[in-house]
Image: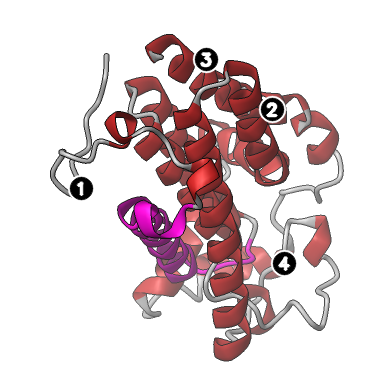
Amino acid sequence: MGKRRIRASVLLLIVLLWGGAESRALHAQERDTSLSNSEIRFCADEPAGSSLDVRGLALVYCTSQPVVTVPLQGAHATARPVFYGAVPAAWVGAAVTQDQSAVAAAYRLTLTQGVTYGLVMGVKHIVGRPRPYVHRPLEARAERHDPPAPGDAHLSFPSGHASLSAALVTSWSLSHPQWYVIGSGALWATGVALSRVHLGVHYPSDILAGAVLGVGVAVLVDQIRRHVTPSPFRAAPAAQGLHAPPLVFRVQF
């Protein structure tokens, strides 16, 4: 069963890496990240005396060092392929391995993604926070926001990308607590979240709230899995760790 669980986790890692193959094509659709005159003015003048949120925005948005911008662009390019592909890949992995614990993990991943998305969209429409480019002299670097879509310009809080990436990575890490799953997943989710600030479509507080929401949903689903998982999707009692104390996070090397 251990080998089956490893194969299932590797399948999802392949999905994460598969998104990288799309990065060049998707990156070609993004606007040139060289700073315009208005952006130079924002980076030089506005952060001084501004709130911590605005200073954090400027710190990430205004950086031009390739060692920072290239990984963030790559994380951004892989985000949507993973959002669309992670759940199907988890179910395919469960079908291939014929492992009931993999089925349970795929179900929790599905539930986590669905609940997170629903909560994010609800909070976005309730709060209605303007995105940075609405009131700040900067431009969105993502094609989807350039020019800004009227219905999307006031949906900044919380970040959907940060929420979904944190939720998926946390859910899968709780199901497969190997170091390479946790480490690579955390690195990728952090890159996705920071890329939203670098693109000028979110404030740091947006991605922080999104990450907390995503992690919270994943942990909650994991903790109440016996109550929310239909019997056909449940793992065997031994695989569920019924005798383990709550919130124990074991890393297997």
| Residue 20 badge | 2
Q: How many marks?
A: 4
Precedes in sequence: disc 3 or disc 4: 3
Q: Residues within 10 Å of mark 3 (few under 14, many from 20)?
A: some
Contact (Cβ within 8 Å) of mark 1 with mark 4: no
Across and down, in percent, residue 80 comes to 71, 46
Specify whether residue 157 is painted magenta. Answer: no
- In the displayed structure image, the side of residue 223 where residue 122 appears, left or right: right
Q: Which residue is mark 1?
A: 247
Specify whether residue 202 is painted magenta. Answer: yes
Is residue 78 in sight in this rendering? Answer: no
Is residue 75 in sight in this rendering? Answer: yes
Report the magenta residues as a range.
Answer: 200-229
Q: Which residue is mark 4?
A: 139
Q: Residues within 10 Å of mark 2 (few under 14, many from 20)?
A: many
Precedes in sequence: disc 1 or disc 4: 4
Spatial CA span between label 2 and label 4:
25 Å
Residue in view at x 34 percent, y 58 percent: 224
Spatial CA span between label 1 and label 3:
24 Å
Precedes in sequence: disc 1 or disc 2: 2
Spatial CA span between label 1 and label 2:
32 Å
Which of discs 3 and 2 lies nearer the camera? The answer is 3
Spatial CA span between label 3 and label 4:
43 Å
